[in-house]
Amino acid sequence: MAFYLHRDGQTVPFELETLRTMARQGELRQDEYIYVEAKGEWIGAALVPEMSNAWNIEESEATVAMEIPPEFFAGLDAGAAPAPEPAPAPVAIPRAPEPAPAPRPQPAPRAPEPAPAPRASFGGPANDFGGAAPSSGKSSAQGGGRAKVRSYEEIAAQPTQFDAIELIKEAWGISKPNLGMLILSFLVVGLVSGIASVIPLGGLIVGVPVAVGLTVVSLRLIEGQDVAIGNVFDGFKRFVPLMICGLIIGIGTVIGTLLLILPGMYFAMASGYAPQLVLDRGEEPMDAIKGSMKVFNANFVSLLVFAILLGLLNFVGVLACGIGILITAPVSIVAMNLMYKRLFGVAGGYANPG
């Protein structure tokens, strides 16, 4: 039920409890008029049933107070009672507009899916073994050209900063979707090397060109290119310089080992990136060995720690009944070629050696 009061020239709506409070506080007199919407008329405040006890008076008292006000007697003395002023007509109270509905939350945009890993295929792109879909980003090396790379002096002048553990994790991330290809490549290289070792000097002559096939497979995966099992034999396209490089490293390691072992270990590690330089940059064997040693010396401590971590990784692989080495060795080879890329950059010759 709605109630209205005429205040300050305006008809104002009030709640019942508000009117009762005003009456108790003396803000609403008994002789004022209240418009009761349910009855459609103006009624004396004290005559509104819901207001009868607001001033602590009885209904009969309120009735007399409203029906015979003092002004009535004054009107009689004057000879005529003044006509009461017409009560103001009630005004239509516009309804407050309903609040606009809150906007529905929109779903958050989906994060872009990661780029698929490069494909490791056997005999062609249609025949794959555990490999992921080919990457959309192709290296410029796929066309056979060589990218511009820094000189050995520039690399050695500014030692490379890297986290060895993070690099090994990155190598695992590349290897995991391509383990089938990597394990098969590792077995093929081991088989060919084993057969060659039966022939006198066969292992020393063929060993490096065969082993470099694992470098080709690793670099192609690192650069996001398709890999086929035939890439294992790409090292034979630079057979002579790789063979010479392998002979020099082998002879130098033997001589160094005879000199209290440590010099031989140092030479084998320091010259370890020479085969990649011969394959990828097209360097002559001696220039590749010198360049590898120069960069190794500039990053001696970091590369020594890296080599120790890879040794521990493969030791764990051997402890796993010897089978674990089939996983840890290929991952280590990928890690070594990631290190090669960090140190020297990739020139691109590995993709089309010759």
Image (tube, helix red, strand yellow):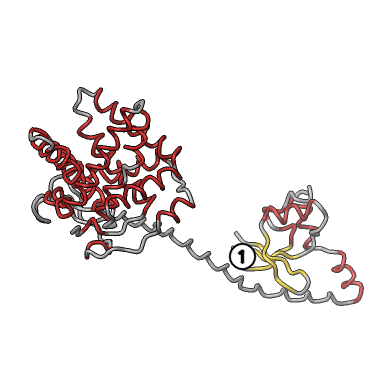
Q: How far across and how far down the image is residue 180, in percent?
A: 16, 42
Q: Residue at x 53, y 64 (%)?
A: 99
Quadrant for the N terminus in the image:
bottom right
Q: How far across and how far down the image is residue 101, in percent?
A: 48, 63
Is 320 located above or below residue 74 in the figure?
above
Q: Which of these two is toward me, 87 or 164?
A: 164
Q: Which of these two is toward me, 307 or 320?
A: 307
Disc 1 packing (10 Å; few <14; some 14–19; many ≥20) = few
Is 126 located above or below residue 273 in the figure?
below
Classify mark 1: helix, strand or loop.
loop
Is 6 located above or below residue 139 in the figure?
below
Q: Of all residues shown, which one is farthest toward the right?
A: 77
Q: Is residue 181 left or right of residue 83?
A: left
Give the labeled residue for mark 1. Answer: 37
Q: How far across and how far down the image is residue 305, in percent?
A: 41, 35
Which amino acid type is shown beneath numbered disc 1? Answer: Glu
Q: Which of these two is toward me, 214 or 17?
A: 214
Q: Is residue 175 left or right of residue 261?
A: left
Q: Residue at x 34, y 51 (%)?
A: 341
Q: Is residue 52 left or right of residue 296?
A: right
Quadrant for the C terminus in the image:
bottom left
Q: Residue at x 20, y 43 (%)?
A: 208
Numbered label tally = 1
Is 238 located above or below residue 269 in the figure?
below
Q: How far across and how far down the image is residue 230, in percent?
A: 11, 51
